Amino acid sequence: MEVVMMTDRLDDGYDVVIAGGGAAGLSGGLMLARARRRVAVIDAGEPRNAPAEAVHGLLARDGTPPAELLARGRAEVRRYGGHVAPGAVALVEARDDGEDDGAFTVVLADGAALRARRLLVATGLTDELPDVPGLRERWGRDVLHCPYCHGWEVRDRAIGVLATGPMSVHQALLLRQWSGDVAYLAHTGPEPSAEQAEQLAARGVRVVHGEVTALETGGPSGPDGAGRLVGVRLADGTLVRRDAVAVAPRMTVRAAFLDGIGLRPADHPSGMGTHIPADAAGRTAVPGVWAAGNVTDPSAQVGTAAAAGATAAAQINADLVAEETRRAVDAHRMRVAS
């Protein structure tokens, strides 16, 4: 199904501008539009899960193609008067002119400037994959990273876990839940510690030493014309037959546009990559700025990201209500005093 993205004409001022039109951003936009806020969702059109055939583990929407899910979300935001427009946020600046209708200026890549009283950052992240020939081309099909997203689709098949970082052993132990044939491909990753080696052995996960130099395909071509994965080739020429390969990419947030307000990515405690630190409600260290979804939680699935967007939106609305109430009280006192 071809999904065409409509474009809303943007105003110059909003209660909230949302950077990012994925699950977190659209969920936040829906919540704020239903709260009768002036909201604009700026969507760069680069969803992280675009290569995937379907979204899984999402209640009542399991198996929905990612593009279809986002199209539904955009329509829902618009139904309540929210604006959704393609584009990328290039820069955010703090406003210091004392005006009540905008704490930030949000500059888009095309030069358009929007005033925003609050900002929700939901731009997600980029998966930095190992430089192994054939791996990127199969990303989202038989090369995967999240067992909860794609484990069912490769159940009972031969799975290889490409060791790339501190989470690789954990990934192998997780995938053992879906298949009895899991191989830990040591590749160039860290060697398992003695404790980890014991865990892998106890769960029947064999360790294959040697650098992986390529993914091998063969057999009849699938819908993408690329054939099926048959295994991984090691530097010594050995072919390790595998039906699927799991990899833990380094995850880098898309947040360079926040430099102007002093909000910069930090290393995530898990070692998986970077994130924008935020509390449980999405509030960042910069007043007026919230973050939701993969930009702050690299492991968030679609449902988790959507919930985080809704939570942050409710907090933003409450923050705006508190500000508006303070102003109303001040105005009331002035009227009474006069």
Image (spheres, grey):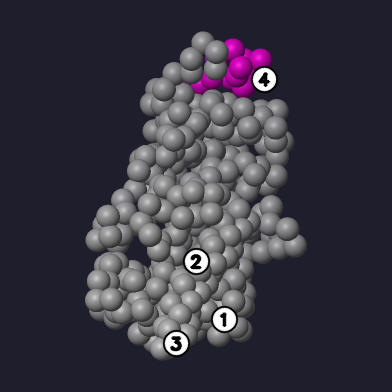
Q: Which residue is mark 3?
A: 335
Relative to 119, 140 lies left or right? right
Relative to 203, 110 lies left or right? left
2 vs 4, front mark: 2
- Residue at point 70%, 32% (across, down): 177
Spatial CA span between label 2 and label 4:
49 Å
3 vs 2, front mark: 3
Q: Amino acid at mark 2?
A: Asp
Q: Which residue is mark 4?
A: 203
Spatial CA span between label 4 and label 3:
74 Å
Spatial CA span between label 1 and label 3:
27 Å
Dots 3, 2 in contact, CB < 8 A: no
Spatial CA span between label 1 and label 2:
14 Å
Q: Which residue is mark 2?
A: 319
- Residue 193, given in percent of the width and then of the height, sits at 48, 15
Dots 1, 3 in contact, CB < 8 A: no
Q: Amino acid at mark 3?
A: Arg
- Residue at point 63%, 32% (across, down): 174
- Residue 11, given in percent of the width and then of the height, sits at 39, 87
Q: Which residues are magenta?
A: 197-209
At mark 1, the secondary structure is loop
Please tell me which of labels 3 and 2 falls first in the chain. 2
Please tell me which of labels 4 and 1 falls first in the chain. 1
Q: Nearer the viewer, residue 219 or 232?
A: 232
User: Dot 4, crowdedness within 10 Å: few (<14), some or many (≥20)?
Assistant: some
Spatial CA span between label 4 and label 1:
53 Å
Q: Amino acid at mark 1?
A: Arg
Spatial CA span between label 3 and label 2:
25 Å
Q: Which residue is mark 1?
A: 36
1 vs 2, front mark: 2
Dots 4, 1 in contact, CB < 8 A: no
